[in-house]
Amino acid sequence: MDFAEAQKEALECCRCGTLCHSRTRAVFGEGPLNAELFVVGEAPGFNEDREGKPFRGASGMLLDRLLLSIGLEREKVYLTTLVKCKPPEGRAPKPAEINACRPYLLAQLAAVDPKVIVALGDLASKSLTGRKESVSRIRGRVIPLDGRYVFPTLSLVRALYTPAERALLVSDFSRLPKLIAAERPSTYGTLNVSRIPAAEREPIQPGLW
């Protein structure tokens, strides 16, 4: 599935048979298709569902501050979530729902081909690294996969309410500029995420809404 096909299908998707009934709007993602940094959260929340865009509200403001602290604006980063629809009552997405949405995430990764993927929170960490350890055990660890660096760290929501975790998140983000500046890994494992050569990628993401 290519990016344009994934984007079109996701906005009307009912693959999982559950989340489509609890959403107001599907939240596919946003950002440039040549972004070196790709941020993945868990799922849209109330504000994202209302606006149709990822990382809004308090979590979005925290992410903006974290990005600015390393000299990046939101517009330079590709932002998305494991699932594209808000789970009911704020619950975490279920494994079957994450798997149903996975083709969309893989299409986004293939199109953007980022150098660094930040996995926010436990579910994103496990899904993107293929490892079973909790994110608290592997946060800040650089994991080479598919010619990219996966960088698991803590969730924005937990950091909002826990100063100690917020400090760890700030510390983790401070390492990203050096990682972005590094060469891509030449020896790595794989999660079978295909890559598109840079010359064939579109420089700007088509408008969504």
Image: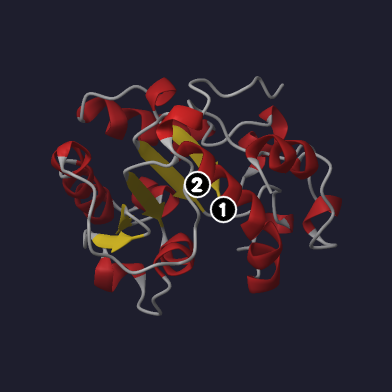
| Mark 1 and mark 2: Cα distance apart in space | 5 Å
Residue 36 place in picture, x, y as percent: 34, 35
Label 1, residues with CA under 10 Å away: few <14, some 14-19, many ≥20: many
Display colour scheme: secondary structure
Whether residue 33 is visible, yes or no, is no
In-image side of 101 versus 145 (left or right): right
Residue 126 place in picture, x, y as percent: 44, 69
Residue at horizontal 47%, vertical 60%? 124
In this view, 153 is above or below 170: below
In this view, 78 is above or below 115: above
Residue 9 place in picture, x, y as percent: 79, 43
* Local SS, label 1: helix
Q: Nearer the viewer, residue 28 or 61?
A: 28
Q: Nearer the viewer, residue 115 or 96?
A: 115
In-image side of 87 versus 15 (left or right): left
In this view, 99 is above or below 89: below
Q: Name the amino acid, label 2.
A: Leu
- The residue to which callout 2 is attached is 109
Query: What number is the disc on residue 106?
Result: 1
Query: What number is the disc on residue 148?
Result: none
* Local SS, label 2: helix
Residue at horizontal 27%, vertical 55%? 165
Whether residue 12 is visible, yes or no, is yes
Q: Are marks 1 and 2 in contact (CB under 8 Å)?
A: yes
In-image side of 60 versus 140 (left or right): right
Residue at horizontal 41%, vertical 63%? 125
Q: Name the amino acid, label 1.
A: Leu
Residue at horizontal 41%, vertical 41%? 38
Residue 26 place in picture, x, y as percent: 73, 40
